[in-house]
Image: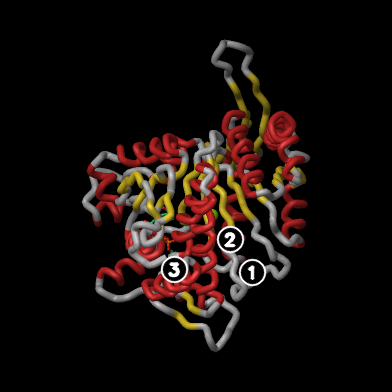
Amino acid sequence: MKKGDTRNKIKVKNTIVEIDGDEMTRVMWAMVKEKLLMPYLDLKLEYYDLGLKQRDETDDKITFDAANAIKKHGVGVKCATITPNKDRVKEYNLKKEWPSPNGTIRAVLDGTVFRGPILVKNIPPSVRNWTKPILIGRHAYGDVYKNQEIRVPGAGKAEILFTPSDGGQPITHTIHEFKGPGVIQGIHNTDKSISSFAKACFTFALDQKVPLWFATKDTISKTYDARFRQIFQEEFEKNWKKKYEDAGIEYFFTLIDDAVARIMKSQGGMLWACKNYDGDVMSDMLGSAYGSLAMMTSVLVSPEGFFEYEAAHGTVQKHYYKYLKGEKTSSNPMALIFAWTGALKKRGALDKTPEVGEFAHKLEQASLETIEDGIMTGDLLKVATPNPKNKQVYTEDFIDEIADRLAKKMV
Ligand code: NAP
Ligand code: MG
């Protein structure tokens, strides 16, 4: 197909919610759309500008509107956005420190975030036997992230107390009789949140046709961690057992330390559901072992089956300041491209329009081949297998190289 030929564009039947963002990722977002998507697709987009200025002007209403639009249309794709801190309030002259848009969208969709590596032959993972991607699903509620802590000043008795709202008998246990100073922490979770986390994990593993692994430390934490294990097991037996059998995948539970040991020896190829803290730590370990944050996909999946695809990295602020000075940068657009291909594949599957999924596949292949041909951005050159043909290019040139390869596949 010739670029710019409107007659033969691939029709994407239903709407994708497009959520624009900030800084360098916003710049790359526009390039990806212009050079890789619009020449080939007849796309219905519902556009939400979550650039920091727009969020400020709408008192953050636009973030809620965007999240609700995903609920309406089922599929969204999001650019990286600034979560403002004090410096940003000054820089953008904001009314206040607006909360994280990702946090807001996650809360509206009640979703779980799944991440996975984008694999290319010339960027080997640090763990040699990981030949297939390890996907990670992180529970994003409670535990140590919503805790209460006390610095114990000296001797005394620490207790844990629950007072029922219905006036029932309070429950109390002694945590520790302190003989001197120390620390205490109280954490919680809810059946509702654990259950929607479990549903999202079972949904996503089936969607990806990979086994689901889950691990806790329920031999030690016989009530708290045990509740996670129970809820996953009940959910599996009630809603997924048959579907998993039909798909030829399994649900596997083990202890968290055993899971870590097995992951290191595995080939990959599973979805690893992690409690909040485990997921925080393990996703950074995987991201670094697979090469670069710009080589990770990220998708928010709600238990009702809404999907939001995004890049796992931030707005690449330092590169943006260079860009503003008129300098060219070698920022990596791969995670943004894969956010779009993820959304297109999902849209195509829901709409039963395989040609949309095939286009997304070709775009992914063109992107991977560009890197495998040695043409890469600066972050990748640092971790690629050394080869005389490797060369670092600017973002726009990198996207042009992908566009050339894509054009050949689209003939
Ligand atoms: P960042 O944007 O992820 O960038 C941190 C560093 O990682 C960059 O300076 C760059 O290293 C490297 N990097 C990240 N993505 C890259 C890419 N695509 N290509 C090349 N290099 C890349 O994190 P940050 O600078 O800490 O945060 C910037 C803003 O992003 C913050 O305002 C934060 O609120 C926001 N943020 C948004 C999201 C999101 O919406 N998903 C997530 C995290 C952070 P070098 O400078 O060494 O080249
Ligand atoms: Mg972390």
Distance from mark 2 CB to nearest ligand 1 atom below 8 Å:
no
The quarter of the picture showing ligand 2: bottom right
Residue annotated with mark 1: 125
| Amino acid type shown at disc 2 | Pro
Mark 3 to mark 2: distance in Å? Answer: 14 Å
Label located before the other in sequence (2 or 1): 2
The crowding category of the residue bearing disc 3, from other C-alpha atoms within 10 Å (few below 14, some 14 to 19, many at least 20), is: many
Q: Residue at x 69, y 50 (%)?
A: 210
Residue under label 3, please give it: 332
Vertical relation: 397 (above or below) 333: below
Q: What is the distance, in whole Å, between disc 3 and disc 1 at their CAs? A: 18 Å
- Which sits in the foreground, 63 or 194? 63
Left or right: residue 103 compared with residue 120:
left
The structure residue drawn at horizontal position 62% and vertical position 32%, both measured from the top left corner, is 195
Confirm or deny contact between disc 3 and disc 2 (CB under 8 A): no
Looking at the image, residue 41 lies above or below residue 396: above
Check whether the beta carbons of the residues at disc 2 and disc 1 lie within 8 A of each other: yes
Looking at numbered disc 1 in the image, what kind of residue is underneath it? Answer: Pro
Q: Which residue is mark 2?
A: 117
Q: Mark 3: is the Cβ under 8 angstroms from ligand 1? A: yes
Q: CA distance from mark 2 to mark 1?
A: 10 Å
